[in-house]
């Protein structure tokens, strides 16, 4: 690279590349190469897996949506490897993506919480989001229900069931499964779907099998793995979809120090014992109304009932019937921690919103769910690398006191634009300087003052103004 002038050098040194800071410094802190080796990633065709994964992690930070876009951009000079090297890694069913994600999350906790303290509001959070796809030939693609879409709620895609940990300050993803729901309607469409032969014991084959297991079963399996890996929390937070008797009972039995569960719960046919009488949710609500025990929370402007009941097979639980402002229906919440009051329960349950923020940020900034590869292994690799990058950014954000990814990505974008512009300005200036030198040489004029009055100088000035100021800066603006 040509030696830059001082002002441009200041831009490169003082402002730097945010990508350099995050990818190089934070990856060194996380020991990516060591973690890849520890969980079983093996070298591929002359390039280490950590090198390839590094490139995959950099794409969203370069504001690029795909590998193809990377190799069409000016950033391709960052990598010596060809794009097929990256595709081979993504499509390899032997790659242990789940252990790598768990190792990354564990390293994050080790860095930010070396004493392994468990915060009062720490929680495992389980929820799902919809990935909409456009290709019917994608392996294991199905029609999944998206409650946001209303009646026309079934879309082509996957459900991404994610388990995360809120440690009191940050949310981080720990594990996930891609879920299939309703199969494609037409038989010819099902036949056209991509299929790949896999070893039944490979990581990819196991993820395929998980695809067709119920979300509750997969959710419990992920929780058990997280607890076995040493992750700890005071609570498990889920919505009403996961509030089955089996789920609550299993959660209460996990770990040496059982966790409490707080969840929304359906007012269905399950029974609770209250004053030695077995009642379902509707019957219990009527009894509480007749007793006149309704309360009001001024802070939340909410009417509610709270009652301790016996839930068969689980023991004492606390139920909260709540009617929030501008809502006609009463909602029901369950807490296995009977010491909690209504306001404390709501404050802890509101932590569940962090996973919704995570899904929003990961989709908006990290391109989560945009992979259009037909290979299911590539879909798993894509989601995992998005989650790995989120963990890196969460650490960077925590150390540097960024409040959200909005601010962090604004800084990255500004630095990218500034560095790109600085490099381009220097290259164009260097090229124009060469034109000036050639012009002076051809005119045969040695005196610079005399040269400024010459025809050659006027020609160069027009060339500079038209070519550089009008066109080049517009091109830089568009590229930015």
Image: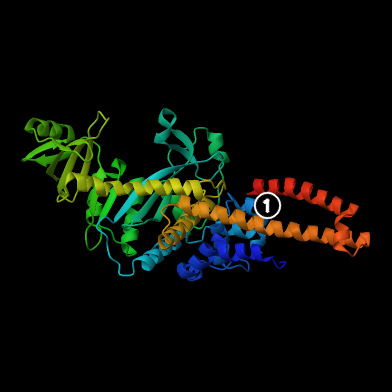
Q: Is residue 320 visible?
A: yes
Residue drawn at 38 percent across, 64 percent down:
106
Residue 44's place in the image compared with 305, above or below, is below
Q: Quadrant of the N terminus?
A: bottom right
Front one among 470 and 20 = 470
Name the spot of residue 427 as percent of width and height, x first: 73, 59
Q: Secondary structure at mark 1?
A: helix
Q: Image check: 66 left or right of 146?
A: right
Badge 1: few (under 14), some or many (20 or more) residues near its Cα, within 10 Å? Answer: few
Name the spot of residue 454 as percent of width and height, x first: 89, 54
Q: Image check: 115 left or right of 28?
A: left
Residue 222's place in the image compared with 363, above or below, is below
Would you name the residue on which mark 1 appears? Answer: 72
**Residue 8 placement: quadrant:** bottom right
Front one among 18 and 315 = 18
Residue 40's place in the image compared with 467, above or below, is below
Q: Is residue 200 visible?
A: no
Residue drawn at 46 percent across, 52 percent down:
405
């Amino acid at each position: 690279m040509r030696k830059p002038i001082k002002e441009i050098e200041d831009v490169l040194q003082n402002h730097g590349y945010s990508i350099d800071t995050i990818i190089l410094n934070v990856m060194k802190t996380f020991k990516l190469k060591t973690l890849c080796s520890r969980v079983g990633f093996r070298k591929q065709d002359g390039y280490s897996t950590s090198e390839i994964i590094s490139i995959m992690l950099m794409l969203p930070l370069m504001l690029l949506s795909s590998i193809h876009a990377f190799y069409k951009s000016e950033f391709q000079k960052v990598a010596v490897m060809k794009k097929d090297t990256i595709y081979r890694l993504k499509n390899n069913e032997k790659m242990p993506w789940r252990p790598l994600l768990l190792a990354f999350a564990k390293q994050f906790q080790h860095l930010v919480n070396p004493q392994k303290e468990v915060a009062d509001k720490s929680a495992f959070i389980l929820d799902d989001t919809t990935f909409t796809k456009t290709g019917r030939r994608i392996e294991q693609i199905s029609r999944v229900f998206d409650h946001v879409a209303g009646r026309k709620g079934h879309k082509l895609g996957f459900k991404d069931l994610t388990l995360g940990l809120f440690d009191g300050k940050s949310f981080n993803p720990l594990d996930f499964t891609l879920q299939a729901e309703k199969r494609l309607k037409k038989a010819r469409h099902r036949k056209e779907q991509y299929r790949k032969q896999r070893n039944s014991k490979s990581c990819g084959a196991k993820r395929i099998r998980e695809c067709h297991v119920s979300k509750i079963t997969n959710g419990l399996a992920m929780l058990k793995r997280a607890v076995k890996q040493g992750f700890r929390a005071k609570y498990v937070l889920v919505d009403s979809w996961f509030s089955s008797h089996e789920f609550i009972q299993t959660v209460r039995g996990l770990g040496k120090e059982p966790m409490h569960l707080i969840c929304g719960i359906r007012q269905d046919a399950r029974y609770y014992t209250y004053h030695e009488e077995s009642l379902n949710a509707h019957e219990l609500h009527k009894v509480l109304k007749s007793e006149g025990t309704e309360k009001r929370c001024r802070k939340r402007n909410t009417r509610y009932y709270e009652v301790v009941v016996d839930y068969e097979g689980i023991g004492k639980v606390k139920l909260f019937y709540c009617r929030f402002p501008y809502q006609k229906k009463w909602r029901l919440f369950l807490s296995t921690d009977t010491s909690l009051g209504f306001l404390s329960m709501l404050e802890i349950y509101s932590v569940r919103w962090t996973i919704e923020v995570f899904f929003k940020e990961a989709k908006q900034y990290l391109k989560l769910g945009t992979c259009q590869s037909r290979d299911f292994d590539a879909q798993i690799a894509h989601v995992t690398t998005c989650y790995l990058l989120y963990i890196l950014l969460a650490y960077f954000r925590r150390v540097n006191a960024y409040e959200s990814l909005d601010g962090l990505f604004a800084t990255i974008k500004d630095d990218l634009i500034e560095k790109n512009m600085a490099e381009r300005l220097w290259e164009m200036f260097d090229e124009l300087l060469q034109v000036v030198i050639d012009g002076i040489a051809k005119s045969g004029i040695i005196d610079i003052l005399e040269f400024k009055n010459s025809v050659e100088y006027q020609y160069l000035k027009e060339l500079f103004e038209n070519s550089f100021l009008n066109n080049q800066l517009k091109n830089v603006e568009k590229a930015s």
